[in-house]
Image (cartoon, coloured by chain):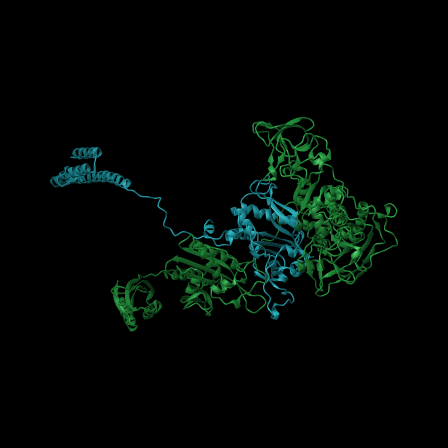
Chain colours: A green, B cyan
Amino acid sequence: MLVSLNWLKDFVNLPADTDGKTLGDLLTLKTAEVDNVIDEGESLKNIVIGQVMEIQKHPNADKLKLTKTSIGKETLQIVCGGENLKEGMYVAVACLGAKVKWHGEGEPVVMEKAVIRGVESYGMICASVEIGLNNPNEGPHDILDLSALKPEVGTPIKDVLHKDDIILEFDNKSLTHRPDLWGHIGIAREIAAITNNKFKPLKVDIKTLPTGRQVPEAGESVDVKVKNKELCPRYCGLIINNIKVGPSPDWLAKRLRATGHGIHNNIVDVTNYIMTELGQPLHAFDKALIKDGIIVRPAKKNEKIRTLDSKEYNLDETMLVIADREKPVAVAGIMGGEHSGINESTTSIILESANFKASSVRKTSVKLGLRTDSVQRFEKALDPLLAEEAIKRAAEIILKICPEASIAGPITDVQKFNKKPVKVTMDTQKAKSKIGADISTQEMKKILESLEFKVTEKGRKTKTFVVQIPSFRATKDVLSEDDLIEEIARIYGYENIAPSLPHLPAKLPLENTERTKKHRARELFSYGLGFDEVYNYSFYGLTDVKKSLLTESHHLKLQNSLSEEQTHMRTSLVPNLLKNLQENVKYFNEVRLYEIGHTYLEIGEYFPLEEKKICGIILTKGKSDKIFYEAKGCVESFIQKFDLSNISQASCAKNTPYAHPVKSLTFLDHNGKSLATCFMLHPTVQKNYDLDKYSIALFEINFTEALKLEPSKKSYKHLPKFPSITFDISVMVDKNTEVKKIETAIKNTEKELISNVKLFDIYEGENIEPDKKAMAFKITLQSQDRTLTDTEMSEAQAKIFASLKSLGGTIRGMNK
Amino acid sequence: MQETLKKLQQEAITAIGKADSLERVKEIEVEYLGRNGHLTFILRGMKDLSDEEKRVIGPLCNETKKTLEDAFAKKIKEFEDEQLAKELSKEFFDTTIPSTARPLGHIHPLSQVQEEVERIFSQMGFTVADGPEIESEYYNFEGLNIPKDHPARDMQDTFFIQEKDDEKHLPAGQAGGKMVLRTQTSPVQLRSMEKYGAPLRLIVPGRVFRFEATDASHDSMFYQVEGLLIDKDISLSHLKGVMAEFLTRLFGKPVKVRFRPGYFPFVEPGLEVDFSCLLCEGKGCRVCKHSGWMEFMGAGMVHANVLKAGGIDPKEYQGWAFGFGLTRLVMMRYGIDDIRLLTNGDLRFIKQF
């Protein structure tokens, strides 16, 4: 919202030299955020009125002229190319130091003495675009001709053009809760309170106007019927006759322009003027186009209206409209209808100044997708008392600018609202305690009164205030003790609250194991296993669901989404990680990355199942399954790091559609519940993501489930007192024999003595039958109570050989 | 005899001292200690001495022999060391070849800063709390004093989950309303109040969502840190103190905190909180747009309606809440100028942290 300092001065005594920036900063610290302070005259500094005294040809350039231009105290030699340049002409002269935009383009540059084609030039005669003005009558090679204004030579141009205002731009968001600040009068009231200057309330007194221009006690009034008084607590209407629609006077147009409004005609401009001044939106109907008075009612089903923006809207029963006997003529509080709008031939108007229920206006506005200055104010909950003040003020101004106009009769005022003032009790001790500053009750009272609150003190020791809230703050904004505390705190000054630390018991915070372990997991994967962590969106598109072979039905879908890629809440971290791979293969031959994040699974209850997952992915160039075992190792490292016990492994990864059907493995807890999987990516998925040139292995860990497991307790075991014996053994078996089978067979032969069996080689190829492979194990024998003898070792070996032979294995060799 | 030994030793030591090569030392060694060496000759002559003479001369001989052996060994080692040093220095070895150590992976900058924030607040006794990312409208809005049709809902464009036909997804009771992707971490305030009651000291770092177009400084998903302190007698002064303490520790230099009025429906009084610009320390520079301050977060005293919704008696307890953008903090700390880099998985970016 744009606020004019000159306009504010109508309502608050401010020193003439008030600095806009300082005032803006003060408002930001005490009231609401001022984003920007624009000094209208700032850009016109050092630009003055000059008169062209003499014109000569430029010795070295055909299109340029050499002028002697007077700026009052001196006459300057200025080179100029303006085609309309004439002797005696009044022009805008940018003196040295002025800021101008060359030909109206680019950043402003500071004027310096220049030599133009060999001739010195001490300034510039400006075109209007060069000094940020707009003169439609100016040709493309013309300069600004100010002769018509007959200005005094040497006068700063900002004075001649009345560019003497300072505009404060408020951040609308910071005014959300303050309906009273949506007009100049409200801002002025705040400024009065925070600068200790006198507030000058609005005085509307139409009766003091010359005879014949008062609100008559009898005469023609608007016939108003309000069908739903809850949605329209007040409706004031007034008929003004003998209107002459025409352009607004300069003073009015200037203020509207300065505050960012378009200029239409005097009547419409007055309604905007009042809205900007008082915060109350008004509407004017052409009386001739309204059939038999005003009816405020809910719209009928399938009713339509074409509004002032020349668009047609479909209405429904939840929307409130202003109608005449035949049709809706305005959407209440939002926009008037085109049909009954003010036009050149309007002679009689019906002025509307009403109060509509905030939530209803807002709902309708959202439904219609129609947001206006009026909605912006009504949705904040306006003071019903303002409606009457505003309609009178509008009448006052219309009569001022249309001297022939006359008020037809009394104001129609249909109303149903609580006029009883709102009172709130405030404990001053509580106020002090919440602000954390020692503010005296005296000061609190003074602050509240400066904002027009009425304070009655109660109680002797612990003082309590009973505060009457002014009507313009009582609709929604100030309703409770805390609201009053805020008023005191901000005017007292947040900068005056000294920082301090609370005296709280040294209590240990509640433990959040999941959080701390998540950070430990990151250290494991990044610093231990060399993976890079990424963050992805929580959603993906239907294409990803299909490309990853997922089932759509388990997904929660977004009702509103930003793109086709972001429609489904992820049930797996995999699809987005695959997209990460697609991008990263452009720059890296090998990629290891992981993500820790939520997945959301539709389980037929109100809330979905939200679980934290860790998903890692390894990509290498070419075809090799080696990385499967790296992925497997990652899960094993995780299990070891977090001391998970009783974890077993089973082949295949269930419910993992994007996993290779065979090259996959599940890790189960003691209840057989899947905790983690690792797998090679399904070839189809690989192809779907254009990654078929690579080998891709993944692991997925259900972090939420893993943390539910009791970590195994560590206890010290004595170091072996007796030496161990190790020997290697190589056995040839069928190609499709699993290592686990042989390993178990070895272990089971001598459970007491074999302390470790470790595979160290698998060999296929030369010297081995094509359907066979050789596995080599290192076997450790260890006894807790004696040194093993050679005989014991030989016996153990013999048993192992026998056992392996019974499985169809052939012993290829043995090394001690 | 004694004289002879003494002289012999003297001669030998002098000869060793004069030796200019390993070969020469070895020659001298043979000359004295070799099979036909001078000392060996004397030792051999021992057998002709009387027992008494043997008793005196014997140890002296041995002593001389030991002294000479040590002197030879020392000199030989000197030459060998010198020789080795000479040989080693001739070798070419390139230490500039890149290392073969397995490169470390990288933890995402958001995770790193988040952990720091958690650690600092934990040290001040704040619990780190969590909540679901898919929330009910109740927890995300109504319970936080943002009723339907409240203009403040405009400030937070919301993602909604598609409604299902079954009863459980229809608006009902507390958990009612539609499901939304939480637009703020504030729902966890309410959930924690319900779960633990007062007093309460916690922070909630987490992922939030906004239905708004993505550009270099806006993303539809980002990270926030919510803070909540509820006890008796908690004031705005404490908020200033705790935030200054936190920021000073985080940035490793003194940071000041400034309050401005702000509006958030779940707090009253409501505040915008700025901190003194780290670059110019409040003097005004390009980074802080010449204000001396950086906009940081929204905060305020927890609204009585929110305390009530959380089952806490606002007459007995009071406190403050704040919410700042962790994502923005990360961007500020590392000078990241495009928010999308944090979520697009580009390892050229991640590997810088």
* Side of B120 where B230 appears, left or right: right
Residue lying farthest to the front in this orientation:
A62
**Rendered location of residue B205, percent (x, y):** 56, 55
Residue at the image point whose x is 88% and y is 53% from the top: A217
Front residue of B203/A749: it is B203
Q: Left or right: where does residue B329 sit relative to residue A470?
A: left
Q: Is residue A274 visible?
A: yes
* Position of residue A317 measured from the top left corner of the image (x, y, whole percent): 72, 64
State the residue lying farthest toward the left: B48
* Relative to B340, residue B90 above or below: above
Q: Position of residue A374 (x, y in %)?
A: 72, 53
Residue at far bottom of view? A806
Q: What quarter of the picture does the C terminus of chain A occupy?
A: bottom left
> In the rendered view, would you say A661 is above or below A468?
below
Q: Is residue A363 visible?
A: no
| Residue A333, quarter of picture | bottom right
Residue A158 place in picture, x, y as percent:
69, 36
B322 relative position to A703: left or right: right
Q: Is residue B83 placed above or below A522 in the rendered structure? A: above
Q: Nearer the viewer, residue A633 or B292?
A: B292
**Extreme residue toward the top, this view:** A74
| Res B222 → quadrant | bottom right
> What number of labels is visible?
0
Nearer the observer, A537 or A400: A400
